[in-house]
């Protein structure tokens, strides 16, 4: 059991929770994740450890409400308990003093990006952060990133915050400077990460991406999270979640993710309807 200490909304469908998890708080490193079950008979879902407080014995998770499990998780209030929470899982981010590091976050990707940006900053790197979203209401962690970064760039699809541009436009401008960045870390939707990697490729800037694939057990046994990297099969849960963005077969990964999109949408709609009925009955 993991008790929820604090809960807050970061955006209309994005929630931040601080959860008791003493062992994980002590052992976690940037880039790692947990797998949780809201109830004993619920599905297992992976969530990045967005932050941790070793002294308090807590970790922070940030999630977007998109399916049945995240709806159930979001319905829990402070003081409630999550049935099962396992971690830290995955390979941690390689943190060192590279020089100039550009961290690019798209939408909810800002959550897993935050501990990496923290680590890069604390290692003595000059840090540029680019945050992007469809609109200002979907931007998260802007203030947190501003405290860390030497330079923070905001862009939105509709121009409601920062510059009306894609993150790749800002990234390209960074790469065209002399000298270009020493490292780029990009986290967000697969299509965004793909084009970030394509943006940095002509400049030979090393680019790390963090993949969020279908995942069940988190131990490499089920094979659901397999991806192709450099022509080889890798498992995101144990070999990743971070890989060389220039080596990832994003098209194959996106085809696998799309295979269940129809079922996911049906489940989302059914869950949303059930919640509406429950709220009306409780009114």
Image: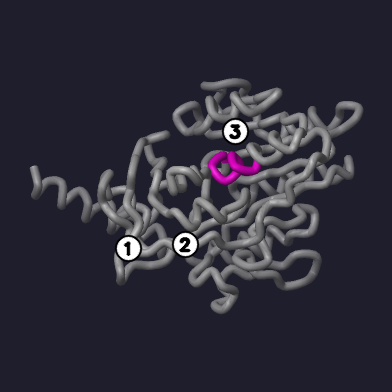
Mark 2 = which residue? 35
**Mark 1 or mark 2, which has the lower sequence index?**
2
Task: Please report contact status of discs 1 and 3: CB closer than 8 Å, yes or no.
Answer: no
Q: Residue at x 75, y 53 (%)?
A: 245
**Image quadrant in which the C terminus is located:** top left
Q: Is residue 86 left or right of residue 83?
A: right
Q: Residue at x 79, y 28 (%)?
A: 173
Dot 1 falls on a residue whose secondary structure is loop
| Residue at far bottom of view | 221
**Image quadrant in which the N terminus is located:** bottom left
How far is disc 3 from disc 2 in space, using C-alphas?
A: 26 Å
Task: Please report contact status of discs 3 and 2: CB closer than 8 Å, yes or no.
Answer: no
* Residue 71, magenta (yes or no): no
Picture coordinates of residue 280 (x, y %)?
A: 12, 46
Picture coordinates of residue 90 (x, y %)?
A: 61, 62
Dot 1: within a 10 Å radius of its alpha carbon, few (fewer than 14), some, or many (20 or more) residues? some
Picture coordinates of residue 55 (x, y %)?
A: 47, 43
How far is disc 1 from disc 2 in space, using C-alphas?
A: 11 Å
Which of labels 3 and 2 is toward the front? 2
| Residue at far front of view | 55
Q: Which mark identifies residue 83?
A: 1
Dot 2 falls on a residue whose secondary structure is strand
Magenta residues?
A: 110-116
- For the residue pair 160 and 182, the one nearer the viewer reads as 182
- The relative height of residue 263 versus residue 31 in the rendered view (above or below) is below
Q: Which residue is drawn at 80% across and 39% down?
A: 97
Q: Is residue 162 left or right of residue 268?
A: right
Mark 3 = which residue? 132
How far is disc 1 from disc 3 in space, using C-alphas?
A: 34 Å
**Mark 3 or mark 2, which has the lower sequence index?**
2
Toward which corner of the image does residue 147 lie, by quadrant? top right
Picture coordinates of residue 105 (x, y %)?
A: 62, 39
């Amino acid at each position: 059991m993991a008790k929820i200490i604090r809960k807050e909304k970061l955006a209309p469908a994005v929630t931040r929770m601080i959860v008791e998890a003493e062992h994980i708080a002590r052992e976690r490193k940037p880039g790692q994740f947990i797998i949780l079950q809201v109830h004993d008979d619920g599905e297992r879902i992976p969530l990045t450890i967005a932050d941790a407080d070793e002294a308090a014995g807590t970790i922070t998770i940030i999630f977007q409400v998109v399916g049945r499990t995240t709806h159930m998780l979001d319905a829990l209030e402070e003081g409630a308990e999550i049935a099962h929470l396992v971690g830290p899982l995955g390979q941690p981010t390689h943190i060192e003093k590279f020089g100039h590091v550009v961290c690019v976050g798209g939408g909810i990707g800002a959550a897993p990006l935050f501990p990496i940006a923290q680590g890069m900053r604390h290692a003595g790197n000059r840090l540029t952060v680019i945050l992007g979203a469809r609109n200002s209401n979907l931007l998260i962690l802007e203030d947190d990133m501003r405290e860390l970064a030497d330079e923070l760039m905001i862009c939105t699809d509709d121009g409601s915050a920062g510059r009306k541009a894609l993150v790749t436009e800002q990234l390209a401008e960074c790469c065209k400077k002399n000298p270009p960045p020493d490292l780029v870390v990009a986290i967000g939707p697969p299509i965004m990460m793909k084009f970030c990697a394509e943006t940095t490729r002509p400049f030979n800037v090393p680019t790390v991406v963090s993949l969020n694939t279908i995942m069940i057990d988190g131990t490499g046994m089920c094979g659901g999270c397999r991806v192709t990297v450099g022509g080889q099969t890798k498992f995101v849960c144990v070999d990743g979640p971070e890989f060389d963005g220039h080596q990832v077969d994003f098209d194959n990964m996106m085809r696998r993710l799309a295979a269940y999109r129809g079922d996911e949408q049906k489940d989302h709609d059914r869950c949303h309807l059930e919640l509406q009925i429950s709220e009306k009955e409780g009114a």
